[in-house]
Image (tube, rainbow, N blue to C red):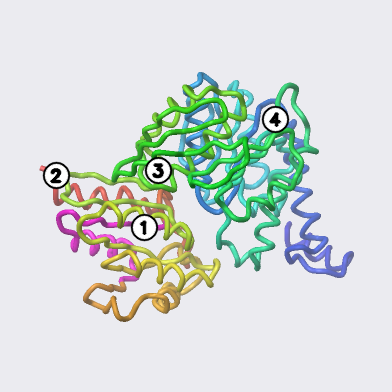
Amino acid sequence: MIKKIKQLGKRLLGGTFAQGTPLYEFYHKGRGVWAATSSGFPAAKMIVVGVTGTNGKTATCTMLAHILEAAGKKVGLMTTVNFWINKKKWVNESKMTTDNPFTTQSLLRRMVKAGCEYAVVETSSHALAQHRTWGIFYDVAVFTNLTQDHLDYHHTMEEYRRSKEKLFKNLASSWKKPGVAKTIVLNFDDPLHAHFAKYPAEQKLFFSAQNHQTPPDTLHAKEIHLAATGSLFTLVSPTGSIKVQLQIPGRFNIENALAAATSAYALGFPLADIKRGLESVDLIPGRMEYIKAGQPFNVISDYAHTPDGYEKSLSSIRQFTEGRVITVFGAAGDRDKEKRPLIGRIASKYADVIVLTEEDPGSEDPGQIIEAIRAGISAEKFQESKNLFIILNRRAAVQHALSLAEKKDSVVLLALGAQTKMATPTGLVDYDEREYAKTLLHKKYSS
């Protein structure tokens, strides 16, 4: 069908199906319109929060959903990791942040049928560029941050940013629900927040984990105390403050908590509900997730796959690791190739041992991907077969990393996170890295 549409477009429009061409726009927008219309515009019947940015989207969405649940609301959730429809919760195995418009609208319709009052939707730049979210009438648009990613698709950072901006650009003109203010929530600490702040909204709120001059409508994190398994901070709002004890580690998760808290605050929820919701989050699958089976060292699965994600994740883990940091990672095939040496350089900065392996290689040769990563790894600090290992098979790489680990070390399994499938040259294969690592650890350390 798509092939026939492309051929028709070439004849009628004299163009191709490349991104940005009339046929491309017609095809994708047509799908979005068809999906929303045939589903009866379910987003019009709920309060919808859309979260976009490079990193932190899944964590922010999950934390916000917990806040809403803590306040007694029925919630629908769509993220890279999982789906919620009120009490029903299951894993997202599509390997997509925002799925095709038909699946997305179907999920929204099911949320309405289940009585959900709120829908929290992780919204990707691809989805915005391809009109997958057409007919989703957002009420709150949230920006977490913007760093390098997806340049294989967007080509430039400016184009990437403009795709994200569509969520904010279209907010004020979309269907307005009675009594619900069109709201923009922005990370004031990200230098690009001004690009998103220029769009109209009935209210604009900011959040910040840094001590600098901020607008009056800003929620802050102060008196921050970081630990290996969580953090304590004071959430300061324009109307009061409250202490929050997060059960998940990393300073960046305080930023995610602020994004969720500010969104809930904008919707009128009190600080007590926000605190209760944030403190109820004890796990975000594949996001700084500890894997425990009685071993005397840490094993952590984290979805970090961008240079900024590597910096935030590995710097946090380095801070609380007394022994060595042992990293297992690669880079996704058929994606942004420019970031490969960058993640190698960042891993060199924080790791003591590096195990390079496959990671969703897709149609690419994983060996060539690894060579691109090696270009960024310090040749002075890392020597092959000593503290740098190249093991193409991911399972064997994880097994080797665990065999190297000693008391007080941290083994960090990067990028795959909570995914249950891996893209290989032969197609998708079943692979849940957390379960695999847990099985290996149980064999050796469970009594």
Q: Are marks 3 and 2 in contact (CB under 8 Å)?
A: no
Q: Is residue 30 left or right of residue 356?
A: right
Sequence order check: which comes first, mark 4 or mark 2?
Answer: 4
Q: Is residue 394 magenta?
A: yes
Number of the front mark, 4 or 1: 1
As measured in the structure, the alpha-carbon distance from the residue carrying label 4 to the one carrying label 1 is 42 Å
Task: Please name whichever residue, 45 or 94, is drawn nearer the observer in this view of the structure.
Answer: 45
Q: Residue at x 62, y 27 (%)?
A: 267
**322 to 19, vertically: above or below:** above
Q: Which residue is mark 3?
A: 285
As measured in the structure, the alpha-carbon distance from the residue carrying label 2 to the one carrying label 1 is 30 Å
Q: Residue at x 22, y 61 (%)?
A: 324
Q: Which residue is mark 2?
A: 446
* The C terminus, quarter of image: top left
Query: How packed is label 2: few (under 14 Cα within 10 Å), some, or many (20 or more)?
Result: few
Task: Please name whichever residue, 224 or 173, is drawn nearer the observer in this view of the structure.
Answer: 224
| Quarter-of-image position of residue 10 | bottom right
